[in-house]
Amino acid sequence: MTSTDMRTDAGDSEPSGYAAARLRLLQEGARSGPPRRAALAELTDEWLTGLFGAGTQDGKESKDRRDRRESQGGRDGGEDAARLAQKGGGRRENLRGVSLVAVGGYGRGELSPRSDLDLLLLHDGSDSGAVAALADRIWYPVWDLGLALDHSVRTPGEARKTAGDDLKVQLGLLDARHIAGDLGLTAGLRTAVLADWRNQAPKRLLELQELCLERAERQGELQYLLEPDLKEARGGLRDATALRAVAASWLADAPREGLADARRRLLDVRDALHLATGRATDRLALQEQDQVAAELGLLDADTLLRQVYEAARVVSYASDVTWREVGRVLKSRAVRPRLRAMLGGGAKPAAERSPLAEGVVEMDGEVVLARAARPERDPVLPLRAAAAAAQSGIPLSLHAVRRMAAVARPLPTPWPAEAREQLVTLLGSGRPTIEVWEALEAEGLITRLLPDWERVRCRPQRNAVHIWTVDRHLIETAARASELTRRVGRPDLLLVASLLHDIGKGWPGDHSVAGEIIARDVATRIGFDRADVAVLATLVRHHLLLVDTATRRDLEDPATVRSVADAVGSQGTLELLHALTEADALATGPAAWSSWRGSLVTDLVKRVAAVLAGDAPEEPEAAAPTAEQERLAIEAFRTGGPVLALRAQTEPPAEEESSADPEPLGVELLIAVPDQPGVLPAVAGVLAMHRLTVRTAELRAFDLPDGVRGSVLLLNWRVAAEYGSLPQAARLRADLVRALDGSLDIAARLAERDAAYPRRRGTIAPPPRVTVAPAASRHATVIEVRAHDAPGLLHRIGRALEDASVRVRSMHVSTLGANAVDAFYVTGPEGAPLPGEEAASVARGLEEMLRG
């Protein structure tokens, strides 16, 4: 519902003056942001003041109002109007000792277009019947206009008691604001509530912190979510309100720089979301982001998300600093009386300062600058302090970071050796690096050290596989790489490559190509020599090479292995690239790495290492069938139908974990079937019907012994169960028999599945893309398919390739989130690669089929 629907929500034939004025205000294009929120609150104040002072109307209460009274009266736990009416008899009197109070967001004067009205009818308890009548006079017009109302009727004592029992009520009362009636009553409650809050701060702040942590665990971090909740996620509006509550306790205060602007930006986005959707929602869903961006006059949804992330980052960092200060103060209060007693009530002892590095000490659980430190003369000090903090696992003091940001000199170009070493130490410190990095970034020190960082800062990644923004993903990769430094000869290059591998995502075109150029420049500026710069550029340019090749190419093909060896160039670079590949995948998200992918990459690395060592791979000869394959082929020929076998595949444990059990990599499915048209789509369709995910597949013809006419197709596939356990081989065979003889309509069965396949409302998958990979193999033409994953996708592709009269020699299937990235090695009927124009035609036809 949009703001223009207010008339239909009113529930009355004539909209009230307030409804019309509210509608005009929300439709004003010239007024938005804080002025509109304040104007809406002021307009609502005037209307409610009129309702508060108006005389009651006699007459029989309508059924709708009685129903509303029963369903909504007193839902905040206070003494509701109905109960008060029974006690007081609903008398009409001139009211004294009653006030109308706005609390929560309305109390702060921040009304978004669809915000609830949070109201407290405060009374002294002298005339409950008159208060009940007054409550009716206010609540029902609000409901009649379709406005959400969160209301309560309480005496000051009841309000304080409820606040003492319910932290959320107490937080709302901290923002209590007088609207109408007895000003002294409201002021008295405000004073009492603030006094209670400050007196109980040591206990209540810990409750508030626990509430914030629980909410963050449930809702996630606003600065990284593709569909964030602007209010509930960590770094959102709830956290900004919590910081106000901490400040009201006088125990600690949040860093103010940028906090008000961040909060305003989040409120502006919520206003635009309310206007765009017509709903009281705080969830910034994907399908609404473009409309919200347009409402705010922003370029696109990515610009919107980046602004949201930047605001959330400010709130999150302010929260970290504030809660750390709260903990320090509470700890100090607990320890100080004992120290004073031990010292006989003497002077306050000086805080202990423990040296960590030159110019850097630890004090009160934080890393601070030494008294003799001179950041204006020591350009390496920010990196030295950051490295010391990360190495010791202690947070950097906000004051120290701000002082360095304000006066520290820029590093010369190239950096001195100490600066480069401190950067590597910082990146190699593991998980503590992330918090320290964010502290530097909050004060602009990262972009001062690495200007190219600005393009990736807070940049969203619209990919279901990625769970972080680009900048956070880079520092997460460095943290993951720090665990792999024992596997490489140059840990410094691994860590710096991890930090830079996606630096090109802020530029148009292929981010690996752009990133190579940026990496050369950054590495030179940091002070690496020419050879190291070349290695870092190679790592950034080819950081996707191993995983892409291992999961989408035939590793038995010498051309595949040689192409990787040519790109990598040396054993040392291959070693670094292997570790970078794993760190990058682990830092991307759970869908990007698995034992199966890891085993394929390791296999590829071994083959490439052999080539780099001078052991050129020989052209593969057709491998002789195994005894099991031969048995299945003969049985398939004898019976005239498919024969299959399932066998679990496992990875042996690493040497350092020799006592561990092997980890399952999937199930090998061997199928033998007399050569006939439609085998690939039939098998793929049956597997899809049984919810089996295909990881790799190879097809080959088995020649029967001399004197026997005919041939048998052998299919060697690795599969995994999508849900639960694998189906029985007998069931698979029975369905495959029916699929091959035409009695099982696979297309219809999969269409039913596809109709019921869960899809996110409003999301539109990008169109599929089919390309021919140039010079990928000398034995076959490689056709790459990138499409939205769905039940039966392989069946449809197999049918299209069958219709194009090409044979599939093998295929390599990879699913990343909702995206399928598959490679098919195909030949013509005679077993040779397809001519260029024919291959392009097959790819075009396949893409048209998938788009249709």
Image (spheres, grey):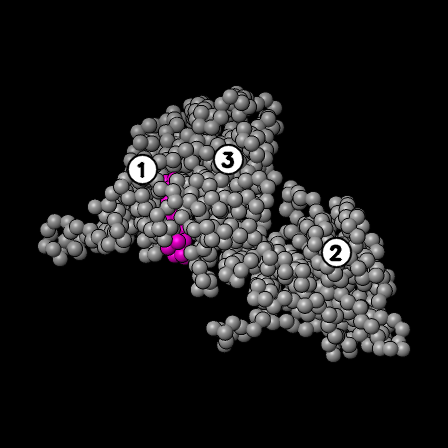
| Residue sitting at x 67%, y 44% | 766
Considering depth in this image, is 239 or 321 the residue closer to the camera? 321
The picture quadrant where one finds residue 684 is bottom right
| Residue sitting at x 24%, y 54% | 355
Numbered marks: total: 3
- Residue 118 position within the rendered picture, expressed as x and y whole percent measured from the top left: 44, 35
Is residue 432 on the magenta stretch?
Answer: yes
Left or right: where 693 falls relative to 730 = left
Given the image, on which type of amino acid does mark 3 rest?
A: Arg
Q: Main secondary structure of the magenta part?
A: helix
| Quadrant containing the N terminus in the rendered view | top right
Quickly name the residue at label 3.
270
Quickly name the residue at label 1.
406
Is residue 293 on the magenta stretch?
Answer: no
Given the image, on which type of amino acid does mark 2 rest?
A: Thr
Choose mark 3 or mark 2, whichever is in front: 2
| Quadrant containing the C terminus in the rendered view | top right
| Residue sitting at x 75%, y 47% | 847
